[in-house]
Image (cartoon, rainbow, N blue to C red):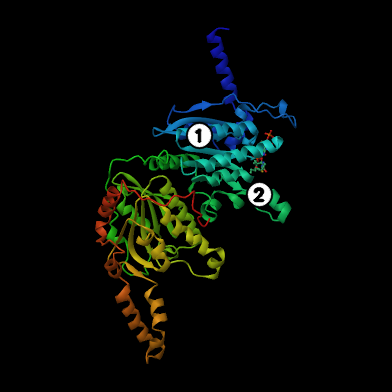
Amino acid sequence: MSLKRKTRELIKRREQVISGGGEKAIKKQVAMGKLTARVRIQALLDKNSFHEYDLFVEHEARDFDMDKKVLHGDGVIIGTGTIYGAPVCIYAQDFTVAGGSLGLMHARKITKIMDHALKMRVPLIGINDSGGARIQEGVNSLAGYGEIFFRNTLSSGVIPQLSVILGPCAGGAVYSPALTDFVFVVENISKMFITGPSVIKTVLGEEISMEDLGGAKVHSEITGNAHFYSLSEEECFEQIKKLITFIPWNNTQKAKAFPPKKSKSEYKVEDIVPSDPRQPYDVRDVIRAIVDDSDFFEIQELFAANIVIGFGRLDGDTVGFVANQPKVLAGVLDCDSSDKAARFVRYCDAFNIPIVVFEDMPGYLPGVDQEHAGVIRHGAKVLYAFSEASVPKITIILRKAYGGGYIAMNSRHLRADFVFAWPSAEIAVMGPEGAANIIFRKEISGAEDPEEMRKIKVKEYKDKFANPYVAAAKGYIDSVIDPEETRNMLVHAIKISANKIDNRPAKKHGIPPF
Ligand code: HXC
């Protein structure tokens, strides 16, 4: 056979595989409002950058009539490409082929591209759309998942790992996304759960829809499993592309620097924060007033909104922001917000991203619910993460820094490199009202007019401690700054910390309060 004929045959074979599960299955996929696996890859990657491997891999299952079935590409597409020129490895499960179910060869394709990503030190993107372990392949499917989980763990903190949930992700399959850095979900399309509605009905007798059990909103607002929520696949791909611009390819590099830009003039930092410490405001406006082009890329926006996390740039460099949100629960730390903040701090630390903290909070959330939910264990994660992080760490105290919150939010004592405070900062063991009620109890109750005495004592306490100067006199704060100086101070602090070296005692690893 001539080379020309052989090439024509190759093209025919390729076309056959590319047809996936066939016209009917593709129609069904589209009718569900979903793109097909191949279209997803094309939509996400730079034009013509995708290179596919293992196109001709076939399954080897023989039981349950599987020997009579042809599963094109074994239900998953793997390859490499670029996003804004940055190299990535990618896999996308093809639901049109046996429901994207994971058998031995399907898993081998995924682990092959995972191994490439780790070896080449480039980000890995996994698009999940699957009925889970291929039932006909028994333990081989389970083995496949185990191999994936092991690689997720091996790659953790070395290369960025992104999981995109664009269909069902059921059973133990959910643990691969859970082991990765960022999970993307889309309204009406993403479904994640360990046991599906039918099992729940059988075991517990409860009826629940897939959406209510583990839809996009559930994981974005309640469980915190998802980091990015969107209304369409197209919006989801835009989020992924944007994230890629903020993070480095691997843990030996820094994120790509962009041309510096000023923040937009509509955000004027001094006008955002009310002087009354009980008045709420949106701390994201403070971040927007500081970052380049006022472009703040928020992560887990809908989960534990009492803390805000995300990326922005300062003079072109990527920075990770952690900020108390006074407009939600006064910005307290509780179980969920502690988990959210601590994990993000560890992400930034692993990938050489400086951390900036904006602090304004009354401490940890009191109450039986929180105590019994483990606020000690969860809250300790914040202390651990900030203490452990050796990237440049800078804190700006905007208003309240009370009690454990003062320590936890990247204080000097946890080795912040720079701590700045606005003149409105109040640094104390607790709020003036609570403090006066405890230490002046006798004077207040014995006074002729206890209410008047309380006011006097609250003022006395406020004058003494509710300011930044006591902490500044001890050197716990490096500078009390004019709010308008904030951006300049931060830009300088980050530039000056670019070659920071922070040696820690050698150990295999610590034991964080997981
Ligand atoms: C083999 C599967 C499959 C699976 C779906 N298919 N899931 N084949 N193994 N796990 C096949 C179907 O037989 C069907 O094939 C095609 O994929 C499309 O599936 P439908 O059911 O027609 O699609 P839909 O109505 O959209 O329902 C999707 C679904 C449902 C909700 C995901 O298929 C489903 O419940 N599947 C089983 C989910 C599950 O319990 N998986 C195992 C989880 S346990 P045909 O040939 O008819 O087109 C697990 C353990 C992992 O994953 C442990 C790791 C530690």
| Residue 483 visible in rendering | yes
Q: Which residue is mark 1?
A: 90
Q: Please name the residue shown 69% across and 27% down the image.
A: 69
Residue at 29% in and 70% down:
470
Instruction: Say which quarter of the image contains residue 448.
Output: bottom left
Q: Residue furthest right?
A: 64
Measure how far apart labels 1 and 2 are at the Cα level. Answer: 27 Å
Left or right: 38 as drawn, with respect to 395:
right
Can you tell me whether the CB of the residue at mark 1 lies under 8 Å from the nearest atom of ligand 1? no
Left or right: 197 in relation to 184:
right
Q: Is residue 90 above or below residue 401?
A: above
Label pair 1/2, CB-CB below 8 angstroms: no
Q: Quadrant of residue 245?
A: top left
The kind of residue tagged 2 is Thr
Amino acid beneath label 1: Ile
Residue extending furthest toward the bottom: 448
On the rendered structure, is 9 left or right of 311?
A: right
Q: Quadrant of the N terminus?
A: top right
Q: Disc 2 designates what residue?
A: 195
Q: Give the residue drawn at x 34%, y 48%.
A: 501
- Secondary structure of the residue carrying numbered label 1: strand
Identity of the residue drawn at 59% across and 26% down: 19
Vertical order, 450 against 119 (above or below): below
In the orientation shown, which residue stands out farthest toward the front? 506
Q: Is residue 304 visible?
A: no
